[in-house]
Amino acid sequence: MIVTLLVGGVVFWLGYDGGSYSLTSRTTLAIAVIWAGIVGIATGLLPAGRSWRGALVPAVFLALFSLWTVASAAWAASAEDAFVEFDRVTLYLAVFVVAALAASRLTAPRIADGLALGITAVGVLALLARLFPGLVSQSDLKTLLPTAFTRLSYPVNYWNGLGILLALAFPLLLRTAAAERSWVVRAAALAPLPALSAAIYLTSSRGAVAVAGLGVLALLLLAEPRERWAVVEAGALAAVASLLAVLVLHARPAVVNPPPSGAGSSASGFVLILVLCLACGVAYAARLRLVPTWRAAPVAGRVAAGLIVAGLLLAVLAAHPVRRWHAFKSPPVQPARGEKDFVQSHLFSANGSGRWQFWSAGMDEFRDRPLGGRGAGSYEAWWARHGSLAVFVRDAHSLYVETLGELGLVGIALLAGVLVFSVALGVSALLRAPPEERTTRAALFAAALGFLLAAAIDWVWELTVVSVVGFVCLGVLAGLGGSEPSRPPARGHGARIAAGAAAALIGAALMVGQAISLLSETRLSASQAAVRRGDAASALSDARSARDVEPWAAGPYLQLALIEEQIGHLAVAEKRILQAIHRDETNWRLWLTAARIQTKRGEVGRARRSLDRARELNPRSPIFRR
């Protein structure tokens, strides 16, 4: 219970905190995870299982991937962006290692339940926020993304990210509904699925639908044969209730497609969806208690699997795949004027929302420097200069394409080593699983596959909560997938001290990297707060502190330039902005700021050259339209 609540609470907080996308949230989490790993190893609580050594292979690949990421700062235009990406990778490395060390036959089901519990809590909160808009304030989202406010994003603040996160819970909840001993727990696990389906519908995320479908199908194929029919029964019942929940929302256009002023409350929608969830759980409980369990012949399972595959093939053929492929590659189109059901029309459309163009730009970046790429974090600048659409994009919407472009063949080879060996250990964990553990491992494997699919089609790598869930699943499977030693590993006092010392040394190095970014970011935030309250002296002091912590970063120098410009020290401001440009020559915003400061100084010629350089780096921006 402690493990379940701990994992569930952490996942819920990560989702509630904007998906932990911000640098401050992510680095704080990384320090906490690394510290937990050090304490666990030093006290002997970790490793919990006996077969964790197999996880060393993907962990080493992930460590090498992080080293290659930070090494790319040597040739990247922005060492600051490369260091940020290094911190991101080391967080996932820490999560993977701790999950692998914590994996055992006892903890794996509880970790799976904790993931499902935390994700379910996020989904319920998201649905309540739409049904009762006054429950939480979403004014920031309306300001930042007014045209996309229709799609449910709270609390993760990205509709596809929220939908994909909720989709990862489907195989985990169905595992509990099919494999747990208590009929009360099984019924309670099935009850939230209609609400999660309704929330995914409100996100209008096609990626989430694909991830949920892959997860459920993988669980169905890989579960313990004796529990496979329980998965089918539970899934069928949840599917019917989910369809009814979606129809409840469809009948309330103001909830599904709210106007810019915001959606109205829908107490009736809340009551009906709550009734459907309760009815789903009660009906399943009645089935478990009153109807005798039946066992189908093995041939029936093979026939059912064949029918499912045939149905999927027919559905693909009926959808005109060639036509949909061409529609996917087409540039995105704005919703038609007077469009009243954007959520549903987008959900059933085949347009790729610009992904083909994003991926093409990433492949162009790869072809420009195929071996080592242009450095971690370089895709945003590459797209601004060479992209084909007049939209702002920071990520390539595909981890694999972005890695190719930014880190080249070396980077993608290291990343492939992480994923291939992790999946291989997951398969090993399934093959070695006793019958009573097979469905649990199948659910974790299904969720991991869903994460890998999501990483291929969206920027969930940068959305911390989704990637943490994915790496927990991969880490637990890796910890279970190695071959067990013939005798338990020695846990003597000397061995524990040595392991604790090694963990402390490595962990301290990783925490220093995280602390650098955290301290720099907090000092910059303090400087910006000081500017807002009119305290220029404190603003300059905090900005200088950020510069001293991270001297290779352009951000502190930009902040110094803006403060000096505001207080009228234009000569100093120009010096600071040129120092920022020296640290990131591909950032068009820095050149534009330089042009403004130089114009104020009367240096029209230099200002014109800076403006031309900014336009060259971002030629499609509306700012530079003549």
Image: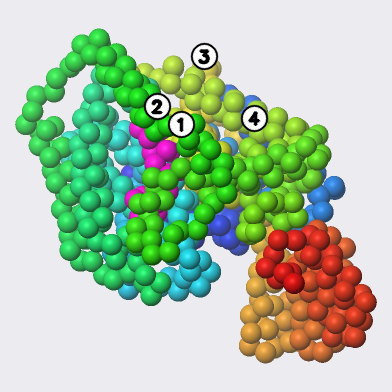
- Helix, strand or loop at label 4? It is helix
Three-letter residue code for mark 2: Leu
Where residue 59 sits: x, y (%)? 63, 33
Give me the disc on residue 486.
3
Give me the disc on residue 317.
2
Q: Which residue is mark 1?
A: 321
Of marks 2 and 3, the one in the foreground: 2
Three-letter residue code for mark 3: Ser
Looking at the image, which is closer to me, 255 or 196? 255
Disc 3, disc 4: CB below 8 Å? no
Dot 4: few (<14), some (14–19), or many (≥20) neighbours within 10 Å? some
Q: Which residue is mark 4?
A: 416
Where residue 623 sits: x, y (%)? 70, 71
Disc 2, disc 1: CB below 8 Å? yes
* Residue under the image location 38 percent in, 51 percent down: 345
* Residue under the image location 42 percent in, 45 percent down: 349
**Please, is residue 110 above or below residue 491 in the view?**
below
Where residue 289 sits: x, y (%)? 9, 33
Of marks 1 and 3, the one in the foreground: 1
Which corner quadrant of the image does residue 254 belong to? bottom left
Q: CA distance from mark 3 to mark 4?
A: 31 Å
In the image, residue 212 lies in the stretch drawn in magenta: yes
* Residue under the image location 32 percent in, 24 percent down: 311
Which corner quadrant of the image does residue 190 belong to? top left
- Helix, strand or loop at label 1? It is helix
